[in-house]
Image: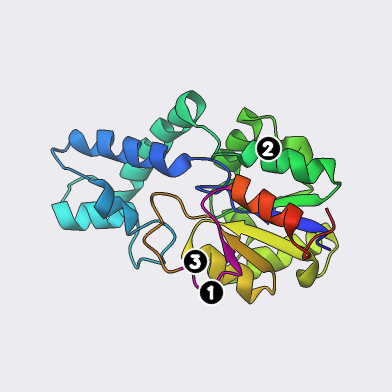
Amino acid sequence: MFKGVIFDMDGTLVDSESVTHRVWMDYMKEFDVQFPLDDYKKFVGSGYHMSVGEWLKTTHNLSISIEDMYSEKKTRLKQAYLDELEPMFYAIEAINFFANNEIQMAVATSSNTDVTHLKINKFGLTEHFSSVLCLEDVNQKKPHPEIYHKSIQNLGLKSEECMVFEDTLTGVKAAKAAGCFTIAIPNPHTAHLDFSIADKVFNNFKEAIIWLKESKLSDL
C-alpha cells in the first residue's frame, strides 16, 4: 500500500505552462519576436541545454539583458497566475481523494518558492501538503533525484511507499531514480516526449484514480 503521494506542480497539478507560454509570447511581441508553441515545448521538462530567456536573446539577438528579461517576465507571470491559472483536469479531485484516504501528500517542484506558494494558496491546498520543496531547497535540479529523496524523508517514508505524479521526462527520471512508483500524466506541452520509463502513463488524474481504485497496488 502506498502511504505517500508526491506531486510535481507545473503542468501536473496546475496548468501553468499554458499561462507561462502566453506571457512569454505577449512579452516577446514588444520586441517583434514570435514565440510559437513548438519553440516553447522544447524547454518544458526535457532537459534542454538553454533557458527560454537565453534562447530568445541568442536566437533573436535581443539587446535586453537576461536579468532584466526575467525580472519583467516574473512580474507579469505572477499577476497572470493570479488572474488566469487553473488546476489540471481532476487534480483537485485527486488531492481530495488522497486526503480522504489519509495518504500523506507533498509537492516537489523546480519552481521558485514564492511562485509555488502563490499557486498552492490560490486553490486553498496548503493544508493538504506535509512537505513543499522548491528550487531553492535543493542543490541539483531534476532529473537528479535530490528533491524526491528529500520529500520522501520529510514524509518519514521509504521510497517504495511513495507514488509520484509527473508531467515531464526530467521529472519522471528524477522520481524513478529516487526509487518511487512513478505515474506520468503528459499535458499538451509534453505529450511528444517518450514516457516509457514511467511505471504508468495516463491522460489525466481521473484515469489514474480509477486505475488506483481497481488496482491491487493500493488498498485505498
Residue type indicated by callout 2: Glu
Residue at x 45%, y 50% (from the top left corner): 187
User: Does residue 36 sit above or below 77 in this rendering?
Assistant: below
Label 1: element kind: loop
Counting residues from the N terminus, which is met first, the one under dot 3 or under dot 1? Answer: 3
How far across and how far down the image is residue 57, in percent? Answer: 22, 52
Q: How far apart are marks 3 and 2 (CA)?
A: 25 Å
Q: Of the two numbered discs 3 and 2 on the same chain, state the one appearing first in sequence.
A: 2
> Which label belongs to residue 93?
2
Which residue is the site of mark 3? 170
Closer to us: mark 3 or mark 1? 1
- Location of residue 200 (image quadrant): bottom right
* Rendered image: mark on residue 149: none
Kind of residue at disc 3: Thr
Per the image, label 3 sits on a secondary structure element best described as helix
For this view, does 56 lie left or right of residue 45?
left
Residue 141 visible from this viewpoint: no
Alpha carbon distance from label 3 to label 1: 11 Å
Q: Give the range drawn in magenta.
A: 195-204
